[in-house]
Amino acid sequence: MKTLSDAQYIHALIAEGEHQQQDFKFEISDARKIAKTLSAFSNTDGGRLLIGVKDNGKIAGVRSDEEQYMIEAAARLYCRPEVSYSTQTYQVEGRSVLLVQIDESDRKPVYAKDETGRYLAYLRIKDENILATPVHLRIWQQSESPKGELMEYTEREQLLLDLLEQNDRLSLNRYCRLAHLSRRSAEHLLAKLIRYDIVEPIFEGHKFHFKLK
């Protein structure tokens, strides 16, 4: 089997473009901002950062020592819990490209500290980092306990299924209005049915909706 050179390997990754498990960064100048991406990858399927690559795929190169320090600061100081990652430097066209591989976390949610000091959790959807909703936070919270083979089924669950059949998809706010439920109760029910693969969240129009699977 033929082994790819550093340049061939990096160019092959760049050819994939940015997607759910890959992001390009020209440089890292703010550990807090990169912590947001680390949170998103950790809370979804994992992924990799190519640092020293512009958004258009052109190689700019980095001084890898500085970038490695910023990654470490983001992962250890601005993420909670700390993010697991590995790095490797590749030489391409006389420039250094830093590849950062981030694992999917088994301790979700991973929060990132923003400029105001708040800790927020993110998801990676396509090539975007999206703020996790309270429903996602409840899914992760519920995942700390075994769900069991059977789900408790009451009139509230039946009403949610009926509403989804009638409306195709619902936003959280619309579900609360139609079902006359508090946000807390609605979030709990949606999270439970998502865990049992009955309902799925759909991101469209810059917001989440929920539909039957």
Image: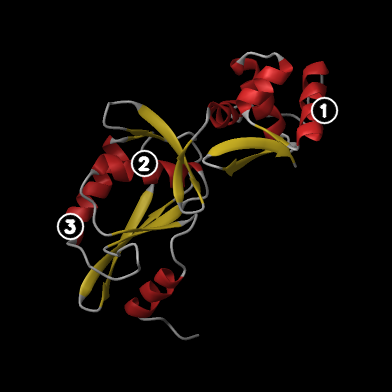
Amino acid under disc 1: Asp
**In this orientation, does residue 150 appear?**
no
Q: Measured along the vertical axis of the image, is residue 35 above or below residue 171?
A: below
Rounded to the nearest whole Å, what is the CA distance between mark 1 and mark 2? Answer: 37 Å
Residue 164 lies, in percent from the top left, at 76, 32
Q: Are marks 2 and 3 in contact (CB under 8 Å)?
A: no
Secondary structure beneath label 3: helix
Amino acid under disc 2: Lys
Amino acid under disc 3: Asp
Q: Which residue is mark 2?
A: 36
Q: Is residue 196 left or right of residue 73?
A: right
Rounded to the nearest whole Å, what is the CA distance between mark 3 and mark 1? Answer: 56 Å
* Quadrant position of the C terminus in the picture: top right
Q: Measured along the vertical axis of the image, is residue 46 above or below residue 180?
A: below
To which quarter of the image does residue 184 belong?
top right
Q: Measured along the vertical axis of the image, is residue 60 above or below residue 171?
A: below
Residue 86 lies, in percent from the top left, at 35, 55
Q: Earlier in the sequence, mark 1 or mark 2?
A: 2
Q: Residue at x 28, y 26 (%)?
A: 117
Q: Which residue is mark 3?
A: 65
Q: Earlier in the sequence, mark 3 or mark 1?
A: 3
Taking depth in this image into account, of 144 and 161 the one nearest to the observer is 161
Residue 170 lies, in percent from the top left, at 68, 32
Mark 2 or mark 3, whichever is nearer to me: 2
Q: Residue at x 26, y 46 (%)?
A: 72
Q: Is residue 148 left or right of residue 39?
A: right
Q: Which residue is mark 1?
A: 162
Residue 174 lies, in percent from the top left, at 65, 25
Q: Are marks 1 and 2 in contact (CB under 8 Å)?
A: no
Binning the other alpha carbons within 10 Å of mark 1 as few (below 14), some (14 to 19) or many (20 upward) gives: few
Q: Residue at x 30, y 65 (%)?
A: 53
